[in-house]
Image (cartoon, helix red, strand yellow):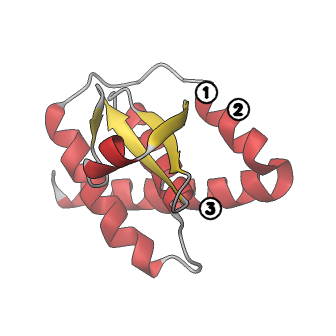
């Protein structure tokens, strides 16, 4: 990925982080959920290297965001950008009751792309969108 494409990707990620904050503040989780379920057909064909590039870019941008980014926001943003780049991605929310643990991650083709694969084994998926 050349410098201009990478800069545009970073800009898109910041825009998506801000979009999430606005949607969540105005419409709550239901608005975020509804916005992610409404898939827009990708403008570009899927490319395998995009997954790693987008996930790496999210990891680089998140520490510089003005507030703490939780796993759900990170996952929604990652999935939206992956879908925009032609890679169908799902946000999965999972939990474990004892001791309680809840977490969100992104899957592409049933494979976790933005987090540790152990979450699939340790947590029960509650929602996939």
Which residue does the numbered mark 2 point to in the structure image? 34
Which residue does the numbered mark 3 point to in the structure image? 18
Disc 2 crowd rating (10 Å Cα; few below 14, some 14-19, many 20+) is few
Disc 3 crowd rating (10 Å Cα; few below 14, some 14-19, many 20+) is some
Going 50% across and 44% down the picture, which residue do you hit?
A: 94
Q: Is residue 69 above or below residue 117?
A: below
In the structure shown, which secondary structural element does the residue marked by tag 1 occupy?
A: helix
At which x and y percent is residue 49?
15, 40
Examine the image and state in which quarter residue 50 appears.
top left
Q: What numbered label is drawn on residue 54?
A: none
Which residue does the numbered mark 1 point to in the structure image? 37
In the structure shown, which secondary structural element does the residue marked by tag 2 occupy?
A: helix
Q: Judge left or right: residue 49 versus residue 76.
A: left
Examine the image and state in which quarter residue 19 appears.
bottom right
Of labels 3 and 2, earlier in sequence is 3
Q: Is residue 77 above or below residue 90?
A: below
Q: Is residue 30 above or below residue 17?
A: above
At which x and y percent is residue 127?
57, 33
In the structure shown, which secondary structural element does the residue marked by tag 3 occupy?
A: helix
Examine the image and state in which quarter residue 51 appears.
top left
Q: Is residue 84 above or below residue 10?
A: above
* Whole-number angstrom distance, CA of label 2 to CA of label 1: 5 Å
| Relative depth, front residue between 52 and 116 | 116
Disc 1 crowd rating (10 Å Cα; few below 14, some 14-19, many 20+) is some
Q: Judge left or right: residue 124 versus residue 129.
A: left
Going 27% across and 50% down the picture, which residue do you hit?
A: 118
| Relative depth, front residue between 58 and 100 | 100
Q: Are marks 3 and 1 in contact (CB under 8 Å)?
A: no
Q: Quadrant of the C terminus?
A: top right
Q: Are marks 2 and 1 in contact (CB under 8 Å)?
A: yes
């Amino acid at each position: 990925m050349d410098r201009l494409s990478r800069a545009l990707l970073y800009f898109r990620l910041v825009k998506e982080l801000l979009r999430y904050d606005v949607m969540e503040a105005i419409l709550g989780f239901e608005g975020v959920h509804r916005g992610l379920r409404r898939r827009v057909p990708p403008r570009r064909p899927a490319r395998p290297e995009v997954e790693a590039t987008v996930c790496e870019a999210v990891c680089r941008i998140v520490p510089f965001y003005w507030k703490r980014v939780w796993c759900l926001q990170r996952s929604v943003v990652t999935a939206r950008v992956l879908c925009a780049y032609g890679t169908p991605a799902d946000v999965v929310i999972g939990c474990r009751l004892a001791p309680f643990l809840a977490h969100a991650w992104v899957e592409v083709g049933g494979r976790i792309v933005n987090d540790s694969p152990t979450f699939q084994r340790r947590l029960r998926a509650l929602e996939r969108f």
